[in-house]
Image (spheres, coloured by chain):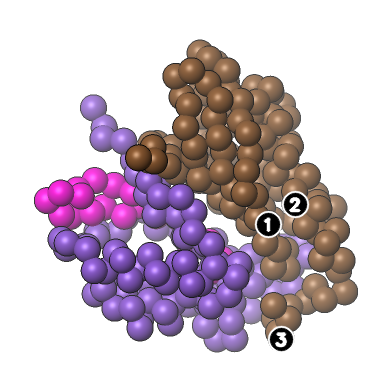
Chain colours: A brown, B purple
Amino acid sequence: MADAEDHDDDRDDSADEAAVRAANQAFYDAFEARDLDAMSEVWEHSDRVSCTHPGWRTLRGWGAVSGSWFALFGGPGPLQFILTDEVVSVDGGVAWVTLDENLITADMGGTVAAINVYVRDGARWRLVSHVGSAVAPQP
Amino acid sequence: MADAEDHDDDRDDSADEAAVRAANQAFYDAFEARDLDAMSEVWEHSDRVSCTHPGWRTLRGWGAVSGSWFALFGGPGPLQFILTDEVVSVDGGVAWVTLDENLITADMGGTVAAINVYVRDGARWRLVSHVGSAVAPQP
């Protein structure tokens, strides 16, 4: 997508994409491990962050978002995923990842279609928005 | 969010935000009007676009995404929204908008929490990803 707005032609696109994939993996690793410290490292701590869990209203700001992880991690049952169909797009200092979260639990089985938006923070990428949308069971 | 990566300090942030809001409004205007030509104008026509309608699997690429609008626009019932809680974030050449789509139809009433990701295309902003997640009815 090279155009006059693209200031990042000198960057290694594949390195950016790999760094975003690593950030996205760190998000799901923290999720599965119920590790609040690791989850905190993944996110940007700012007012602009937002998080929409499946079925939930959108939460805004790091305070509300971190509170939701605290609540989810304290809930019953395992949180484990098989991640499929991950596609990473990087455009300058922003990246977005779309993928399927295939939950492997007795009571929450099913697929969630998700998008995660990351912004570059030096050598790191920080999560600024997560939306999960439950996929209706296929007939 | 000024940092070493921010190449857009010379831009008028409020003008960018207004342009993104206009693009987002054009998306919902096309949606409500069932106007495929207008919807086509809103989106980037590329392989990287994706669209996740509530309950659907993620569709990838402009061909699949445009086909879904064709199908939706041919379906029964009105598609009308009251949009609330719209928050626009712009970071360089990418913007993302989170908002609630409050459907006002007899059979599809309810709220969808949505995110729309736009990329700068000259003076325009083009939609590259839309995800809608149904909000569970509040008790």
**Residue placed at 81% from the left, 66% from the top?**
A13
Three-letter amino acid code at the position of disc 3: Ala
Query: Which quarter shows the C terminus of chain B?
Result: top left
Mark 2: secondary structure? helix
Is residue B115 in view from this perspective? no
How would you rate the neighbour count of disc 1 (Cα within 10 Å): few for under 14, some for 14-19, many for 20 or more? many
The answer to whether dots 1 and 2 both sit on one chain is yes
Marks 1 and 2 close (CB-CB < 8 Å):
yes
Q: Along the polypeptide, which appears first: circle 1 or circle 2?
A: 2
* Count of labels in the image: 3
Q: Amino acid at mark 2?
A: Val
Q: Nearer the viewer, residue A61 or A23?
A: A23
Residue that badge 3 annotates: A4
Q: Which residues, given as a range, are shown in magenta?
A: B95-118
Q: Earlier in the sequence, mark 1 or mark 3?
A: 3
Q: Chain of mark 3?
A: A
Is residue A59 left or right of B134 when viewed as pictured? right
Pointers 1 and 3 within a single chain? yes
User: Looking at the image, which residue sits at the far front?
Assistant: A139
Closer-to-camera residue (B74/A68)? B74
Question: Quick check: do tags 2 and 3 share a chain?
Answer: yes
Is B103 placed above or below A68 here? below
Q: Is residue A34 left or right of residue A131?
A: right
The residue to which callout 2 is attached is: A20
Provide the chain ID for the residue under circle 1. A
Dominant secondary structure of the residues highlighted in magenta in the image: strand
Label annotation for residue A88: 1
